[in-house]
Image (cartoon, coloured by chain):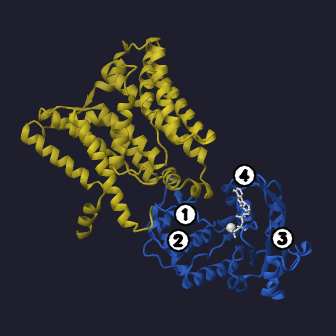
Chain colours: A yellow, B blue
Amino acid sequence: MKNIVRRIAGAQQLGIILIIVVLLVVAQAANPQALMPSNIVEILRSSALYFIGASAATLVLVGGGLDLSIGSVFAVGGVAAGIAMNAGVPWPLAILLALVVCGMLGLINASLITWVGVPPFIATLGMLFAASGIVIVVTGGTPRFGFPAAFTDLGQLNLFGIPLLVFYAVIIGVLAHVVLAHTVFGYNIRAFGGSAPAARANGIRAAQMNVSLYVISAVVAGLCGVLLAARVATADPGAGGTGFAFQVLAAVIIGGTSLFGGVGTIAGTALGALLFAVINNTLALTNTNPQWQNVATGVILVTAVAVDHLRRKRRFAVRSA
Amino acid sequence: MSTLQPTLELRGIKKTFGHVSALKGVDLAAYSGEVLAIVGDNGAGKSSLIRTISGVYRPDEGAILVEGEQQAFSNPAAARAAGIATVFQDLALIEVLDVATNMFIGQYPRRGPFVRRKAMEREARAFLDELGVSVASVRTEIGMLSGGQRQIVAIARAMRTGGQVVLLDEPTAALGVRETAQAADMIRTLRERGNAVIVVSHDMSLVFELADSIQVMRLGEVAGVRRRTDTTRDEIIGLITGAITGDRLTA
Ligand SMILES: Nc1ncnc2c1ncn2[C@@H]1O[C@H](COP(=O)(O)OP(=O)(O)OP(=O)(O)O)[C@@H](O)[C@H]1O
Ligand SMILES: [Mg+2]
């Protein structure tokens, strides 16, 4: 029993859980609808796409990488699927096509990083710009719509009163958790992120790791774009963007994943994504200017990283730089 | 002795980095159940030699033979697969991961795609206990251990991988008296298990305590190879400094 208490108190995410609870209490005090099932479902729905993107981003960051390009790969996914469907391609094939295109972009990121030696920050920042430019050029900046109902159903239907999007998020989250925490691939991700030279000396291939991580990242970002296109029945070339990329990265880092690699959990990321949705929701229910969301994001992000840094410094005493 | 086939043999290994000739045609023979010590001044090429054997560097020229079979290692994984386990001078441990994981990196006990975490912890624990290594928990992160404890874990990992050839690059540098004795015991255990052990060390007491043969490196070449029972510290130190002219014939 004592052990359990200590484990909960020592949990890195305790702070986030507390903030979420406080926000929900404040929201409930201001508006009795806050804790109604319909509002809880709305919170989950609004965090679903961010969480899906953040699950993949967690793998990348734990693996010592960084993928900023998810913002524009998101748009590539939606637009590619939209163009394909408008051209008469059946929707399942259109989705597959879109994900393959996104996967290729991930492969380009991984190639630049592995074989050319471009730092991940630069390679994926370049891709962020280039891919968003191409999407605008190809579409002429105009959205695509007129998709089959079977496609839009994917993003709009509910099951037992809960949006399908939430089910996708749970499935992908569980999958990402199992992969990261329990598989050989996940152990290799943590080893590679913890120290790439040491991982290589122990037989882990850098090329294989980078290709896997950046392709997963791009395919999942593209999937998020496809799902948004289904939900709003429109493929918007301006969807995603830096807003999506930074929200996702903020959720991952607030959830306790280290920017320096090797450390991080999907459970933490889920809390990070949930926190943003709760902040938004509380601001809406209390009729507060939604711009406060950005202020809160900034403050919480910096606080989370600072607290983590101090805790680590204490644990590793003088040794960790 | 010379009629036996060496477990590991190098012939004419050359390696240059830009203008620096780190290895200028190095021969070496390591035998099962023996400890070969490699000594030499700083920059003599000892670490370069170890890295070449373990697949980190590719030799420009020369041959590497394991059990008489010629090998070309394009990466450390290939060398490991051929039965060469290495404790690198810079350790190659991962600080943010725990002791058990570090001992099994790249070779986890698995069931399909999954790591058998419990089995891994149990084996790591049993292995360290058997060696008499004191680590509070195999779940301790490496970053929280002392330098000496880390070194012991690194040696334990090389022992665990069970290669026929075990390379140790300065395994006792920066170790206290107790840990040095422990490392020496571990190296003896390796010899008793029938491994071919190659130890790079600047510690002459350790070398004369452990080695069956001593190979002296000087400026990227082999200055001499001696059986420990046929040589003295003075001769070895003379070969290291160049006071005694090297003889390539014994190599
Ligand atoms: N990766 C590298 N790039 C360039 N030069 C290198 C590289 N590795 C080794 N050298 C050079 O090769 C020579 C031999 O170095 P090496 O590290 O093998 O010496 P060592 O015998 O292990 O020395 P120490 O006792 O200091 O560990 C040195 O001149 C070194 O500067
Ligand atoms: Mg060295």
Q: Chain of mark 4?
A: B
- Dot placed on the residue nearer the N-terminal end, 2 or 4: 4
**SS for callout 1:** loop
Task: Identify the residue at the far right of this view.
Answer: B249
Are callouts 1 and 2 both on one chain? yes
Report which residue position mark 3 lands on. Answer: B222
In the figure, is residue A45 to the left or right of B17?
A: left
Please state, as top left, top right, bottom left or bottom right, where the N terminus of chain B lies in the image.
bottom right
- Dot placed on the residue nearer the N-terminal end, 4 or 3: 4
Rendered residue at 45%/17% (across/down): A136
Task: Give neighbour class at mark 3: few <14, some 14-19, many 20+ (Cα, 10 Å).
Answer: many
Please state, as top left, top right, bottom left or bottom right, where the C terminus of chain B lies in the image.
bottom right
Q: Are marks 1 and 2 in contact (CB under 8 Å)?
A: yes
**Residue B71 seen in the current view:** no
**Considering only vertical position in the picture, is A7 above or below A97?**
below
**Amino acid type, residue under disc 3 in the picture:** Val
The span from disc 1 to disc 2 (Cα, nearest Å) is 8 Å
**Residue A83 seen in the current view:** yes
The span from disc 3 to disc 2 (Cα, nearest Å) is 31 Å
Report which residue position mark 1 lands on. Answer: B93
Are callouts 3 and 1 both on one chain? yes
Q: Chain of mark 3?
A: B
Report which residue position mark 2 lands on. Answer: B150
**Amino acid type, residue under disc 4 in the picture:** Ser
- Dot placed on the residue nearer the N-terminal end, 3 or 2: 2
**Amino acid type, residue under disc 2 in the picture:** Arg
The span from disc 2 to disc 4 (Cα, nearest Å) is 28 Å
The one nearer the camera, A171 or A287, is A287
Report which residue position mark 4 lands on. Answer: B74
Label 1 CB-ligand 2 distance < 8 A: no
Are callouts 2 and 4 both on one chain? yes
Are callouts 3 and 2 both on one chain? yes
